[in-house]
């Protein structure tokens, strides 16, 4: 299985690098500038960059285009499924870090969640990877609150991608696909879980529905400022 994951990861990374030059990628500069400003304004805080699972492959494609500032500062959370293992291999090939979240046994899940809570660096995570899709779960809200992090929604809007008959939404970039990146307003995770859950959902919905990238370095400020 490990050999298959490596082979599939190699093939997927090759495909993403091959298709990257013919995908229209918008919003990169304002998203990166906003991310840098957030980091500079809150140098002693760590961040959670969160997004819908549908944007996972377009986000990796962004990493193939060179630079990849949004990915270099993070450790991305991958689960122990086959697709999670393939994603972890692609991230490794891109030079991006990853952390494992194992769901199959309660003991390992608790330990892995504890590592995420205690992480001193920032993490990236798809918040609907196990469904229901396009919904922020209460488990993520609890994780974000315990981490005392600033959650930053990353809207990844994809048009003209391939779709596969899979249980979850998968956007496969191809020639003619357009990907818009939009960094949304940060959310301070010190709120109570019910209020935090509503804020997290609203912020990601807003970032994901933006016709054009909404944030810029002049307007996006650290949460709580």
Image (cartoon, rainbow, N blue to C red):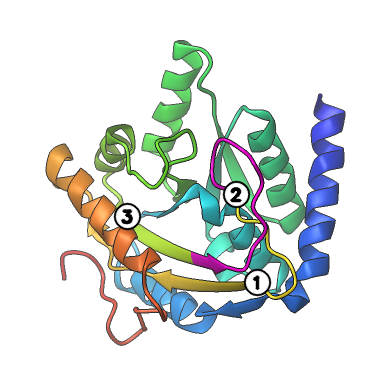
**Front residue (pair 181, 146):** 181
Q: Which residue is mark 2?
A: 170
Label 1: which residue?
177
Residue occupying the point 61% across, 27% down: 80
Residue 165 falls within the magenta-colored stretch: yes
Segment colored magenta = 157-169
Q: Where in the figure is residue 94, as x and y percent of width and height?
A: 72, 57
Q: Which mark is residue 223?
A: none
- Horizontal relation, residue 6 to residue 104: left or right: right
- Spatial separation of the CA atoms under disc 2 and disc 3: 23 Å
Image location of residue 78, percent across then percent down: 57, 38
Circles 1, 3 touching at the beta carbon (< 8 Å): no
111 or 85, which lies in front?
85
Nearest the eye: 167 or 223: 167
Q: Image height check: is 147 above or below 11? A: above
Secondary element type, mark 1: loop
Residue at 68% over, 50% down: 91
Viewed as shown, does residue 202 lie left or right of 101? left
Closer to the observer: label 2 or label 3?
A: 2
- Residue that badge 3 annotates: 151
Quarter-of-image position of residue 44: bottom left
Residue at x-position 33% and y-position 58%: 204
Crowd around label 1: few <14 · some 14–19 · many ≥20 (10 Å): many
Label 3, secondary structure: give it. Answer: strand
209 within the magenta span? no
Total labels: the figure holds 3
Comes first in the chain, label 2 or label 3 = 3
**Mark 3 Cα within 10 Å, few/some/many (few <14, many 20+)?**
many
Q: Determine if residue 192 is in view.
A: no
């Amino acid at each position: 299985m490990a050999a298959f994951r490596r082979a599939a990861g190699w093939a997927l990374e090759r495909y993403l690098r091959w298709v990257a030059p013919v995908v229209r990628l918008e919003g990169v500069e304002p998203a990166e500038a906003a991310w840098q400003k957030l980091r500079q304004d809150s140098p002693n805080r760590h961040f959670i960059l969160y997004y819908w699972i549908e944007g996972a492959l377009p986000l990796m494609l962004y990493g193939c285009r060179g630079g990849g500032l949004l990915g270099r500062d993070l450790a991305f959370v991958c689960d122990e499924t086959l697709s999670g293992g393939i994603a972890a291999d692609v991230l490794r090939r891109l030079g991006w870090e990853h952390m494992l979240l194992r769901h199959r046994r309660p003991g390992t899940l608790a330990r892995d969640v504890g590592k995420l809570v205690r992480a001193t660096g920032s993490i990236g995570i798809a918040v609907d990877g196990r469904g229901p899709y396009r919904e922020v779960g209460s488990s993520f809200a609890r994780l974000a609150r315990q981490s005392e992090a600033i959650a930053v929604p990353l809207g990844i809007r994809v048009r003209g991608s391939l779709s596969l008959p899979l249980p979850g939404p998968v956007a496969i970039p191809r020639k003619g696909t357009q990907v818009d990146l939009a960094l949304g307003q940060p959310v301070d995770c010190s709120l109570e879980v019910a209020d935090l859950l509503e804020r997290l959902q609203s912020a990601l919905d807003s970032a994901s529905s933006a016709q054009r990238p909404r944030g810029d370095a002049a307007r996006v400020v650290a949460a709580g400022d």
